[in-house]
Image (tube, grey):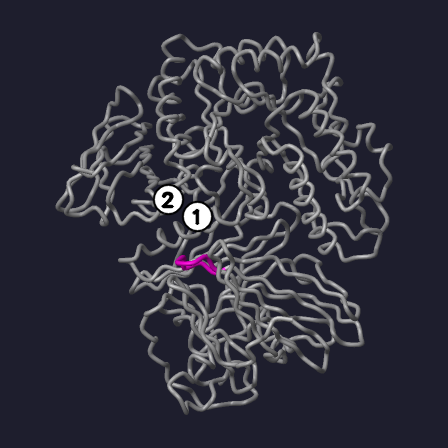
């Protein structure tokens, strides 16, 4: 066994991250600082009178770190039946077991790939509960990834109801912070909002009560759409300095995060599914264990360091470092999909052949046949499951269409919704009940579908046969994996598990299945879709190559989604629909294409009905994209106008090469949907250095763009709306 360092007060980190652990007076080990190396120690807060009975009450300030130690949280918060919390209310902190876990040792390691790792061993001898806290961080990058392994070393069962993936106290007071959160609804994804944290946390005058408030600000989800309602992300920004804490919870099902006031400061706690919100609980018999979902936290030092944009850039770099490698992340082929605002689930040979020819002409490299290709009975929704090609839709066989795609130099793709079986599908009787989601012994039906449970070997075998036939026998190289139902709260596996635990276990089994598919077919490209962006979580993004960002059909409504998508998805994975139509004006064609050019192009539209001049305009845009796409996988996002609002008249998204301090080139997409003709975009990193501005798209722009060197602003003038430009800024002499 590796030797363990048993000291209870220690530091850990590297050139980009510093963590300080200290033992509190109650004996718990706490993370009292998490910042950049060399940052000044924050000034201590005056300590109110000490009340030992008050959770989080400060201890007498006998040393300068007393207030920070008092505001810090135990490393792990654990809620379990029979133990409960020490301070009732809506908050997930102040758990009785979390306050009982004592430091038993820790171990530092460093991987060959540069990751620094720390494992901290905690234990409560009375309950027998043990927690192994895992912290990991890439060398030089101020990002922390953390998760917890919980095990029962005692002699009696423990029923766990909630475990934190990260608990961090000692943050600035609510008055000093802004909080950021992201609404994520069908057709309206990635809608970030922010405001003063104190406006959402009532001040109860802690000095009078000697207690913290019981309230908190919390966001979460319900059901199997992991990002339905909100993204599993958030941020806190110190208003005076711009210092930022930006996080994501890596759960494919339930999650919640909360922030609140504690001991004069603020705290942050990140959780996967729990009992109160998701009907998740785990019975741990002696010797049993489980792991929480991971969470990641990215830091920026201040406004000069880049504030929120810098934290988002670092989170992007982190996401790239922990996902499964795949050639698609570098090549970024242009994808044509026949669905959106085009065939809409009604493909036939007659409709597809001219579309295939037109898509090839404008430069598409993949052609995906979306929903309906299997439907022989005028009802593609509730008949899914067998995945056999329709003879009615393809009288000469689907291979006629697949061969045409290959003949035109493209890779064929198909749509699948693997986790569901329609109620009219013959598969409903071919598989046993145990291969489907159940609750109280009844097979679940949701919106005309049953849900497969991929913990069952029959369900896995059915999908393996399907994919291997489609990929190996049919030569399909792209699978759009959709997911159009949400099961809340999950499956109880015939009454043997809690519904939330069954759902989480299925989610883990689904990831295992995806991994197996790519192990067998390493060149296959997988798109993660759930009615657009309803399952846009890092759990699946770490395996899938492409992420659908929305089902939004209105080209005027898509820009705020496209502009904000890189907060949740690495740009090279963020698929944005570009669906120009023959009835569009040249301005409208350019506008609808622009949003996809800094991410992944999901081309659609009736290209076959366009005039030669219109198709040439689309082809020009694809040519521009192919020239700049090698830079996208090594670029990070920024937002000169701030994160977009849903109704903002002007929006902007920029990409710059990771690690740049401002030198070199940057690309920006700028949209005008209304408002004044001219807009100034602040680019303070570039102030004082002359830059050339080139319009890359459209090829004959109506607007102008110039860089104001003295003010560090990009000045864009667009005389018509809606209108959009794709720009490249290059430092003169660079």
Is residue 235 visible to us here? no
Indicate which disc, 2 or 1, sits on the residue closer to the N terminus.
1
Please state the horizontal and vertical placement of residue 542, each as a whole percent of the image: 56, 45
Is residue 499 visible to us here? yes
Mark 2 lies on residue:
637
Residue 316 got which mark?
1
Please state the horizontal and vertical placement of residue 561, each as a whole percent of the image: 44, 38
User: For this view, does 387 lie left or right of residue 618?
Assistant: right
Determine whether 512 is above or below 299 in the image: above
User: For this view, does 211 lie left or right of residue 663?
Assistant: right
Secondary structure, mark 2, is strand
Please state the horizontal and vertical placement of residue 661, each as a whole percent of the image: 27, 50
Determine whether 681 is above or below 249 in the image: above
* Residue in view at x 43 percent, y 16 percent: 362
Secondary structure, mark 1, is helix
Quarter of the picture containing the N terminus is: bottom right
State the extent of the magenta-drawn residues as a range.
Answer: 137-144
Q: Is residue 140 magenta?
A: yes
Task: Write down the quadrant of residue 141 in the picture.
Answer: bottom left
Residue nearest the viewer, comparing 74 with 189 = 74
User: For this view, does 473 lie left or right of residue 333?
Assistant: right
* Residue in view at x 40 percent, y 52 percent: 314
């Amino acid at each position: 066994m590796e030797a363990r360092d048993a000291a209870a007060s220690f530091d850990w980190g590297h050139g980009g991250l510093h963590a300080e652990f200290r033992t509190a007076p109650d004996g718990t080990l706490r993370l009292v600082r998490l910042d950049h190396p060399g940052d000044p120690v924050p000034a201590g807060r005056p300590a109110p009178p000490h009340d030992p009975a008050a959770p989080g009450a400060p201890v007498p300030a006998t040393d300068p770190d007393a207030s920070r130690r008092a505001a810090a949280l135990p490393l792990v918060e654990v809620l379990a039946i029979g133990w409960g919390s020490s301070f009732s209310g809506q908050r997930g902190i102040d758990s009785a077991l979390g306050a009982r876990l004592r430091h038993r040792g820790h171990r530092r390691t460093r991987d060959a790939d540069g990751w620094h790792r720390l494992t901290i061993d905690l234990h409560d001898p009375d309950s027998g509960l043990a927690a192994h806290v895992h912290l990991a961080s890439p060398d030089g990058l101020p990002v922390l990834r953390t998760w917890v392994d919980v095990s029962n070393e005692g002699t009696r069962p423990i029923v766990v109801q909630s475990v934190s993936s990260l608990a961090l106290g000692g943050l600035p007071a609510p008055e000093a912070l802004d909080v950021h959160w992201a609404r994520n609804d069908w057709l309206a994804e990635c809608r970030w909002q922010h405001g003063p944290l104190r406006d959402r946390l009532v001040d109860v005058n802690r000095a009078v009560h000697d207690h913290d408030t019981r309230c908190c600000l919390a966001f979460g989800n319900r059901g199997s759409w992991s990002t339905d309602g909100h993204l599993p992300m958030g941020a806190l920004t110190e208003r005076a300095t711009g210092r930022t804490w930006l996080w994501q919870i890596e759960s494919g099902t339930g999650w919640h995060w909360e922030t609140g006031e504690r001991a004069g400061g603020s705290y942050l706690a990140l959780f996967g599914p729990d009992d109160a919100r998701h009907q998740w609980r785990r019975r741990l018999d002696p010797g049993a264990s489980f792991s929480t979902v991971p969470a990641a936290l990215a830091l920026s030092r201040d406004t000069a360091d880049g504030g929120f944009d810098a934290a988002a850039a670092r989170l992007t770099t982190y996401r790239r470092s922990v996902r499964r490698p795949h050639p698609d992340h570098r090549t970024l082929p242009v994808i044509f999909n026949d669905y959106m605002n085009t065939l809409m689930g009604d493909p036939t040979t007659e409709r597809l052949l001219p579309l295939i020819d037109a898509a090839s002409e404008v430069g598409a490299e993949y052609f995906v046949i979306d929903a309906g290709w299997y439907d022989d009975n005028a009802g593609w929704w509730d008949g899914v499951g067998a995945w056999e090609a329709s003879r009615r839709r393809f009288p000469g066989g689907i291979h006629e269409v697949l061969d045409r795609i290959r003949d035109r130099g493209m890779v064929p793709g198909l749509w699948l919704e693997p986790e569901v079986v329609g109620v009219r599908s013959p598969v409903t009787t071919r598989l046993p009940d145990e291969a489907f989601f159940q609750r109280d012994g009844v097979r679940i039906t949701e919106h005309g579908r049953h849900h497969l449970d991929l913990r069952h070997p029959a369900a896995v075998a059915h999908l393996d046969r399907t994919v291997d036939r489609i990929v190996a026998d049919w030569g399909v190289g792209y699978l759009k994996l959709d997911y159009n139902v949400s099961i809340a709260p999950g499956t109880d596996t015939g009454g043997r598990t809690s519904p939330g635990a069954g759902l989480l276990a299925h989610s883990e089994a689904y990831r295992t299945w995806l991994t197996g598919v790519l192990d067998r077919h390493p060149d296959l490209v997988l798109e993660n879709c759930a009615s657009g962006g309803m399952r846009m979580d890092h759990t699946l993004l770490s395996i899938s190559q492409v992420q659908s960002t929305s089902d939004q059909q209105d080209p005027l409504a898509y820009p705020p989604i496209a502009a904000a998508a890189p907060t949740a998805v690495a740009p090279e994975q963020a698929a944005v629909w570009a669906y120009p139509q023959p009835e569009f004006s040249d301005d409208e064609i350019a506008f609808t294409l622009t949003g996809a050019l800094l991410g992944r192009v999901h081309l659609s539209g009736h290209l076959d009905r366009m005039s030669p001049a219109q198709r040439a305009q689309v082809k020009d845009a694809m040519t521009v994209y192919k020239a700049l796409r090698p830079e996208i996988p090594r670029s990070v996002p920024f937002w000169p106008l701030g994160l977009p609002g849903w109704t903002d008249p002007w929006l902007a998204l920029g990409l710059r090469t990771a690690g740049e301090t401002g030198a070199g080139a940057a690309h920006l997409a700028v949209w005008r949907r209304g408002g004044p003709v001219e807009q100034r975009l602040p680019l303070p990193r570039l102030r004082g250095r002359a830059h050339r501005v080139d319009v890359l798209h459209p090829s004959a722009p109506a607007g102008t763009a110039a860089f104001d060197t003295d003010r560090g602003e990009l000045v864009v003038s667009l005389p018509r709306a809606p209108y959009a430009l794709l720009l490249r800024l290059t430092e003169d002499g660079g």
